[in-house]
Amino acid sequence: VGSAAARDAARSALLQRLPTSLSGLHVVTMHGLANRILKARAERHGASEPPQLLSATDQFAQVQGLLASQDPNDWPAYGPLLGMRGFVDEVRQFLSRAQEALLTPEQIAEAAERRGLGGWRELARFLGEYQGVLDALDVADFATLLQRGASEAAEGEPLFDHVLVDDYHDTTLAAESMLRGLRAPDLVVAADPAGHVF
């Protein structure tokens, strides 16, 4: 399910149709699924909790603070823009889209080098720094949560017997990779092919 409202509507519709209570039934968003995966894998590795989730506002503040600490000389293409609120939001969106597409800083830097896009090399470097800071703080934004869920989903035994996904047309590469990694014996996705977003 793509949002909290859709999750609640799906849960309500399922509960109305079930003849009995199912304690093992979980209705979650993709981000909620990623969080469950990370929690299960954290316990497997002896940790207690998955990373703390940053709200969109906290993520913006994190990006803004990191950009404010950058040396403009390290940003030949974008140095004069580092303190501008609009640029901060563009960088925040870039970070999210890159992680949702499972792109590494190295992949972005290589593509930028091939195409001669200096500004993209700067963004690739910043993506690596940003991910390092989130790891050090043990926090994750929404895109990082999906990226980490995708990387951890295939570890260990399958976590679910049945997975039903609604609104699959809103999926991202990270969410798709996470679902494949779960290796659920029974996976059903429902989507509107004409409504594909990502």
Image (cartoon, rainbow, N blue to C red):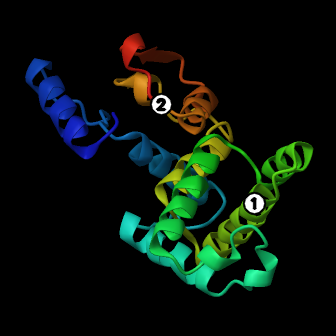
Horizontal and vertical percent position of residue 165: 39, 24
Is 38 in front, or is 133?
133
Residue 190 visible to an observer of this rendering: no
Q: Residue at x 37, y 19 (%)?
A: 195
Q: Determine the residue located farthest toward the left in the rendered image.
A: 16
- The local secondary structure at tag 2 comes to loop
Position of residue 169 relative to residue 41, above or below, is above
Is 119 in front, or is 36?
119
Q: Which residue is mark 1?
A: 119
**37 sits left or right of 32 in the view:** right
Q: Residue at x 43, y 15 (%)?
A: 188
Residue 99 visible to an observer of this rendering: yes
Q: Residue at x 16, y 33 (%)?
A: 9
Q: Which residue is mark 2?
A: 171
Q: Which quadrant holds the N terminus?
A: top left
Residue 181: numbered disc: none
Horizontal and vertical percent position of residue 191: 38, 16
On the image, which quarter does residue 17 sit in? top left
Label 2–label 1 contact, CB within 8 A: no
